[in-house]
Each structure stands twice: as C-alpha cells, then as structure tokens.
Image (cartoon, rainbow, N blue to C red):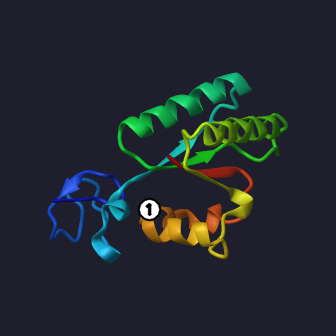
Amino acid sequence: MKVCLVCGNEIEESAWQCCFCGSQQQSLRGGGRGARERVRTVNVKTGLPPVEEALLRLEAALNSARQEGIRVVRVIHGWGSGGSEGKLREACRAYLSRKKTEGRISMLFRGEEYSRANTGVKELLDRYGDLRKGEKTDSGNPGITIVVL
C-alpha cells in the first residue's frame, strides 16, 4: 500500500488515481517513506482572531499534525495588510522560533525566504511533493511560514 499524495489515505501501490479524492498520483522518486508524508495547511488568521487565540490555534494544529504523523505544516498568518495581521505574523513567527530553539520544530522557512534558490527549500519541495502545488503563491510570500516538525 502507498499513501495518496493529496489526501493521505492508503491506496493500492499500483494506483494512478486516488479512489478517495480522485487526485492523480505521481511516481515517487526514490520511493522513500518521506516522499509519501502529507502536508497540512493551517490558516490561523481566519476570522482575524486576537493574537492569543491565533497562537492557541497554531499550537493545537502543530500538536495535532505531530500526533497524526504529518511532518510539514504550511502556516498562513497573513502579512499585515489588515492592520492586526502584522502583529499576528510577528507573534506566530516568534512562537515558531521559540519552538525551534526548544527542539520541537526541525526547520522553519519564512515565506520571504521560500524559494528554490534556497537549498533547504529545494530539498523540501523535492521530498514533499504536496508543497509544489502552492510553490508559485508561497514563494516570496510574507504571509506564510513553512514548518517542518
């Protein structure tokens, strides 16, 4: 069995299309386990919550992803155009930096640094194919942070 690159459900090894979500499957280079792991997107700015509430959402989302074996989380926190989003971005990034210092997060890529020119990002995109779908919108985007647990 292999894991669908989009929805994460187990599908037949030979399947070219997921029977759950209908997405076409690509062959995985190297066939390593890491290439099959899912990516989760978390939008902590939905509803423009106060910073404290957004940080609680972020913490819960990271804990949930970790428990479910998801290794990469795309955090959408906004970049500041709405007034309070700037505070939200800075608070989320400070929180994520602390978690990285504590060893709870392996890597962080801020949207501004998110580019194939960055060797770490290129390796991440190669390993986690789901990230390629948003590469054009995520690259250089100060409203996101990519987290590797």
115 vs 53, nearest the viewer: 115
Labels in figure, total: 1
Amino acid type of the residue that numbered disc 1 sits on in the rendered structure: Asp
Q: Compared to 122, does 1 lie above or below?
A: above
Left or right relative to 18: residue 97: right
Residue drawn at point x = 44 percent, y = 63 percent: 128
SS for dot 1: helix
Q: Compared to 85, does 138 lie above or below?
A: below
Instruction: Looking at this view, name the residue that lies furthest to the right.
Output: 83
Q: Which residue is mark 1?
A: 130
Residue drawn at point x = 54 percent, y = 39 percent: 104
Q: Compared to 104, does 133 lie above or below?
A: below
Q: Quadrant of the N terminus?
A: bottom left
Residue drawn at point x = 70 percent, y = 32 percent: 48
- Residue 50, picture quadrant: top right
- Please rate how many residues cluster around mark 1, counting C-alpha atoms within 10 Å: few if below 14, some from 14 to 19, many from 20: many
Q: What percent of the width, then of the height, locates residue 107?
A: 58, 52
15 vs 122, nearest the viewer: 122
Residue drawn at point x = 55 percent, y = 63 percent: 134
Q: What percent of the width, then of the height, locates residue 91?
A: 75, 34
Q: What percent of the width, then of the height, locates residue 58?
A: 58, 33
Q: What percent of the width, then of the height, locates residue 66?
A: 42, 39
47 vs 91, nearest the viewer: 91
